[in-house]
Amino acid sequence: MTGDTAAETGWAKINLALHVRRRRADGYHDIETIFAFADFGDGLAVRAADDVTLTIAGRFGAGLPVDGGNLVLRAAAALAEACGIKAGAALALDKRLPVASGIGGGSADAAAALRLLNRFWNIGADETALRAIAATLGADVPACVGSRTQRGDGAGERLRALADDDLRGKSVLLVNPGLPLATGAVFAAWDGIDRGPLAEGPPLAAAQAGRNDLEAAAVSLCPAIGTVLGALDGFGASLSRMSGSGATCFALFDLPSDAQAARAAIAAAYPDWWVAAGRLH
Ligand SMILES: C[C@](O)(CO)[C@H](O)COP(=O)(O)OP(=O)(O)OC[C@H]1O[C@@H](n2ccc(N)nc2=O)[C@H](O)[C@@H]1O
Ligand SMILES: Nc1ncnc2c1ncn2[C@@H]1O[C@H](COP(=O)(O)OP(=O)(O)OP(=O)(O)O)[C@@H](O)[C@H]1O
């Protein structure tokens, strides 16, 4: 028995800090990161159907695959296979987050699909089981399953929940210059220098003392990121930086009014950019 309809959100992922420690023999990189999530993201809805299908709408929906190349359908197939079930689902994705932009859009969608279909198909898998399936879909997907503040090690899949008292109630602004950036290309452009570990302790303090080691590589491939970082200056943010492999940059604010003032000023100065404000999730 499945429900009739259900919905989930693929929350936008933010890397508050991202230290790249070494290039591995398998082509991946060992990283140390602090994941946080915004309270907005892509919408994913499902209704009963005989087969598994996907339709896509939304500002950033054009050009995304609607076949097995889409992470939503890959997640559905991986879940069905892991649980040995054969069930249908008509999935509808509202693509609100920019694609290939460092805020885990596809990863967030894949994780939302796992949570949604776990419910819709009455599977009852726990978060640990969903994370194991998620790890087969991409480095960021396990963190997106819980979508809470976490420390990530390894390729990002070794996760530890963080007490997020110093982040509570913070407002967040995300800004993207409208240029896609492929994660693999940014890692490939990293200069290979280990600049040291990410501190332990409260996540905001650790992030403030930390870095995004992919920033220089990403700016070299997409100089507009430098303009975005400059545009985020001067609004009183407690932290502003690039997220993930870029090109999206974030800023954290104590006051929602400061985030909204920055959002309005940047949107007016750069009408082609994607600018979104909300709270941490
Ligand atoms: C940059 C981050 O977003 C930070 O959270 C993640 O490390 C990347 O996560 P993701 O987009 O889910 O990455 P995947 O789809 O698994 O990998 C895309 C490509 O990025 C590179 N990659 C990714 C993760 C990692 N730790 N080292 C890498 O070198 C690999 O070339 C890989 O082929
Ligand atoms: N549902 C989806 N949403 C976005 N991209 C998808 C999706 N399914 C497949 N893709 C493909 O994945 C690639 C981008 O993935 P994603 O949006 O996760 O990157 P990202 O924003 O750079 O994430 P990260 O923060 O991990 O770097 C694109 O090439 C896109 O075609």
Image: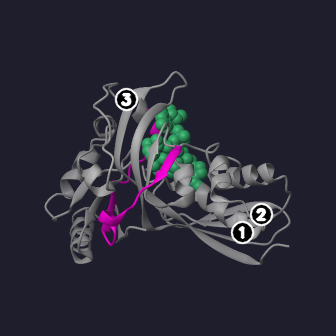
Is residue 150 depicted above or below 173 in this figure? Answer: above
Residue at disc 2, secondary structure: loop
Relative vertical location of residue 43 with respect to residue 146 in this rendering, above or below: below
Q: Nearer the viewer, residue 269 or 165?
A: 165
Residue of label 2: 123
Residue at figure coordinates x 82%, y 63% from the top left:
88
Quarter of the C terminus within the rendering: bottom left
CB under 8 Å between discs 2 and 1 = yes
Q: Quadrant of residue 86?
A: bottom right
- Using the rendered image of the protein, determine whether residue 273 is visible from the camera's viewpoint: no
Q: Nearer the viewer, mark 3 or mark 2?
A: 2
Dot 2 alpha-carbon crowd within 10 angstroms: few under 14, some 14 to 19, many 20 or more = some
Q: Give left or right: position of 133 versus 202.
A: right
Amino acid on which the number 1 mark rests in the picture: Arg
The percent coordinates of residue 240 (x first, y second) are 25, 55
Q: Which residue is mark 3?
A: 189
State the separation of the CA atoms marked 2 and 1. 6 Å
Q: Which mark is residue 119?
A: 1
**Image: magenta residue range:** 157-185
Q: Which of the 4 quarters of the picture holds residue 150?
A: bottom left
Total labels: the figure holds 3
Separation of marks 1 and 3 at Cα, in angstroms: 40 Å
- In the image, residue 161 lies in the stretch drawn in magenta: yes
Which colour assignment does the render follow? one colour
Residue at image position (30%, 69%) is 170
